[in-house]
Image (cartoon, coloured by chain):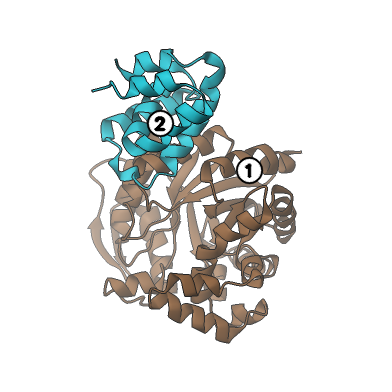
Amino acid sequence: MDYGRIIEMVPTGKRETLSTKLMDLILKSKNADKMPSSLARTLLHQWQQGPLANEIGLTALLEAAVILESEKIMDFLEEKLQLPDVAKAIKTVE
Amino acid sequence: MVRFGIEFVPSEPYWKTTFYAIQAEKRGFDYLWITDHFNNRNVYVTLTTAALHTEKIKLGPGVTNPYLINPVITAQAIASLNEIATGRVILGIGAGDKTTLKSTGVEMHKPLTAVKESVEIVRKMMVGKSVTFEGNVFQTSNAKFFFKPATEIPIYVGAQGPKMLALAGRIGDGVLINAGHPKDVDYAVNRVKKGIQQAGKRLTDVDIAAYTSFSVHKDMKKAAQAAVPVVAYVVAGSPDVVLQRHGVDEEKAEKLSGALKGGKWGEAFGLVSSRMIEAFSVSGTPDMCIDRVAELLKSGISQFVVGSPIGPNVRKAIDLISDRIIPHFEK
């Protein structure tokens, strides 16, 4: 499983909320310096092109959030968005 | 119509500053200013990444200083940046701050002369001239680029004291006034106007910007709380005359300064009063910020710069400014 496939599992109606949450998680993270430079470039490129609620933007955001704030994103997916399958799928990403 | 600028301190990884820069452009800001302190990320690296990810926003250092960066190197950096973002580059230059200079062992020698000479050198370099300059602070001998600068760039002078403000009016294409309270901005704009008149320029020739410490949130208390650390540093660096102008207890200000120097952040921030926040920042709900900007406009500013901390949540604050504050002044 990769992050692109995982984002496909997120219902369209929940993508906007997920995008906003992921942005705040990574922007407020104390681990901001752990962002890989190649992922940062992808994220910034997508952000420049448009909102990050599309599939490519969300994929980059999710990968970043897992690297920077793994526990918080899992809690959010399971408890707030009620998407335990998505959280489970993230654990399978190598 | 007033234009809106935004300032970022590159104290965090470059991708965060660039993220906010992109957002600021999308949300209608006209100017992006990046601070220049040796202890943060490099200003020109930050500006380059911002330039590569934006299309319209004007951008430049706000402000660099001629003591740590020789004016010919500033000219080189600006000319190079102007190849990436042609016609969008602006330069903010000022004397710098004593504390930072002191920690590098550099003395702030003849600040007025240093700034004046720097502006002259940068301007000459930017038109591709060979510059031989015999100044009191700077000297150059046939200094010339091996490339042709794309365009000339507007130079903004950062100023606080009365003489620097007048000089900024005389020589600047713009002025960055480091204040956000109507009493301070009113005083500063009058000094700037004197300089503009001395130079025989029209008031509209110079973009006068209030460069403020700003914090907005729907909850007034949260906005004020976010402003506390920045206000603490502003109070510690303010001369007595400014503290007196705002009725700030000088003894308390001295204690605060001592606590900051000793690294006692909790004590220092605890000494920041609501009066200090009111005097040295623009903070509150969107409506409160609108009122303050409107007051500053009466003083004659043409640009309002939203500076650190911007808000408790920078991303949300940028959206709030774009949704509520900027449209109010576009009417």
- Image position of B181 with respect to B292: above or below: below
B78 displayed left or right of B198: left
A69 displayed left or right of B226: left
Residue lying at 49% horizontally and 41% vertically, measured from the top left: B58
Tell me the chain of label 1: B
Residue lying at 30% horizontally and 40% vertically, measured from the top left: B148
Q: Is residue B85 visible?
A: no
Q: Amino acid at mark 2?
A: Met
According to the picture, the residue beneath numbered tag 2 turns out to be A74
Q: Position of residue B169 (x, y in %)?
A: 57, 63
B78 displayed left or right of B287: left
Cα distance, mark 2 to mark 1? 31 Å
Looking at the rendered structure, the secondary structure element under dot 1 is helix
Q: Are marks 2 and 1 on the same chain?
A: no
Q: Which chain is cyan?
A: A
Few, some or many C-alpha atoms within 10 Å of disc 1 (few <14, some 14-19, many ≥20)?
many
Q: Which chain is brown?
A: B
- Image position of A82 with respect to B220: above or below: above
Q: Is residue B226 visible?
A: yes
Q: Position of residue B83 (x, y in %)?
A: 35, 36
- Kindly report which numbered mark, 2 or 1, lies closer to the viewer in this rendering: 2
Few, some or many C-alpha atoms within 10 Å of disc 2 (few <14, some 14-19, many ≥20)?
many
Q: Position of residue B259 (x, y in %)?
A: 44, 78
- Image position of B59 with respect to B195: above or below: above
In the picture, the quarter occupied by the C terminus of chain B is: top right
According to the picture, the residue beneath numbered tag 1 turns out to be B321
In the picture, the quarter occupied by the N terminus of chain B is: top right
Q: Quadrant of residue B96?
A: bottom left
Q: Position of residue B329 (x, y in %)?
A: 72, 43
